[in-house]
């Protein structure tokens, strides 16, 4: 993917089960159990034609969107510029909303970061994470979940302010064609004010190495009791 600078992977929630069968097809998807005869209401796994039907249906919905690659139920959203990436992402989410297609929020890197840094006692997020599935995830991982409305940034002011700064920085990087990852690295090493340590220091109790010369002592953990 030459020239791609921005990328997101989304996972269609429960895959085939998002495709509803018509009444005739439901009869072909019937099965017998000791408790009686049942039939699927949605496309089940294990049917030979299921992958083809799934890709055809999703292709009809999303196939004309530029910057989107689909591999079964995985959506790869790419863009060479931030504007291209945002445009594609908005189109995918809008089409998904119009066709009642949902994505698996538990697979949007949350577990990955929990495995690296540990499970926090509290997670504050936006309204898209207030579903019953996310509630179950919070209970199973034993953390408190609180929501913050993007329309009322005072509810989580520091985070909303930092997101705004990060967005402006990424736009500037795109305009100047500079490396956004180095910019993120630098901003994460920058103290918020004289009384508040940088995000990296609060997370690791040390600074992280950048291309800017730094004392070796400052790269060592400094845990305060």
Image: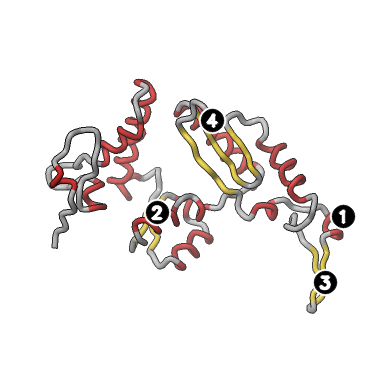
2 sits left or right of 168 in the view: right
Between the residue at mark 3 and the residue at mark 4, the CA separation in whole angstroms equals 47 Å
Q: x%, y% of residue 61?
A: 69, 38
Q: CA distance from mark 4 to mark 1?
A: 42 Å
Sooner in the amino-acid sequence: mark 2 or mark 4: 4
Asked whether the residues under the numbered discs 3 and 4 touch, taking CB atoms below 8 Å apart as contact, a structural biologist would say no
Q: Are marks 3 and 2 in contact (CB under 8 Å)?
A: no
Q: How far separated are the C-alphas under marks 3 and 1?
A: 18 Å
Find the residue positioned furthest to the bottom.
34
Q: Which residue is mark 1?
A: 24
Task: Tell me if label 4 and label 1 are in contact, CB under 8 Å.
Answer: no
Give the residue displayed 65% in from the left and 52% down from the top: 15
- Spatial distance from mark 3 to mark 2, Cα to Cα? 42 Å
Q: Position of residue 102 (x, y in %)?
A: 60, 49
Residue tagged 2: 113
Q: Which comes before the other along the chain, label 3 or label 4? A: 4
Q: Are marks 2 and 1 in contact (CB under 8 Å)?
A: no
| Element assignment for label 2 | helix
């Amino acid at each position: 993917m030459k020239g791609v600078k921005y990328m997101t992977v989304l996972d269609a929630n429960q895959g085939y089960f998002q495709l509803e069968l018509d009444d005739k097809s439901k009869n072909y998807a019937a099965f017998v159990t000791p408790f009686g005869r049942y039939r699927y209401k949605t496309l089940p796994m294990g049917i030979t034609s299921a992958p083809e039907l799934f890709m055809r249906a999703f292709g009809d919905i999303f196939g004309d969107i530029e910057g989107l690659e689909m591999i079964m139920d995985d959506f790869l959203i790419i863009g060479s510029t931030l504007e291209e990436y945002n445009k594609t992402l908005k189109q995918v989410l809008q089409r998904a909303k119009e066709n009642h297609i949902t994505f698996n929020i538990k697979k949007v890197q949350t577990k990955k970061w929990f495995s690296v840094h540990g499970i926090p006692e509290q997670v504050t997020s936006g309204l898209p994470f207030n579903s019953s599935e996310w509630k179950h995830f919070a209970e199973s991982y034993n953390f408190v979940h609180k929501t913050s409305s993007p329309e009322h940034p005072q509810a989580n002011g520091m985070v909303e302010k930092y997101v705004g700064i990060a967005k402006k920085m990424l736009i500037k990087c795109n305009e100047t064609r500079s490396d956004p990852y180095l910019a993120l690295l630098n901003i994460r090493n920058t103290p918020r004010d004289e009384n508040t340590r940088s995000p990296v220091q609060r997370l690791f109790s040390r600074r992280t190495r950048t291309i800017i010369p730094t004392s070796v002592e400052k790269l060592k953990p400094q845990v305060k009791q």
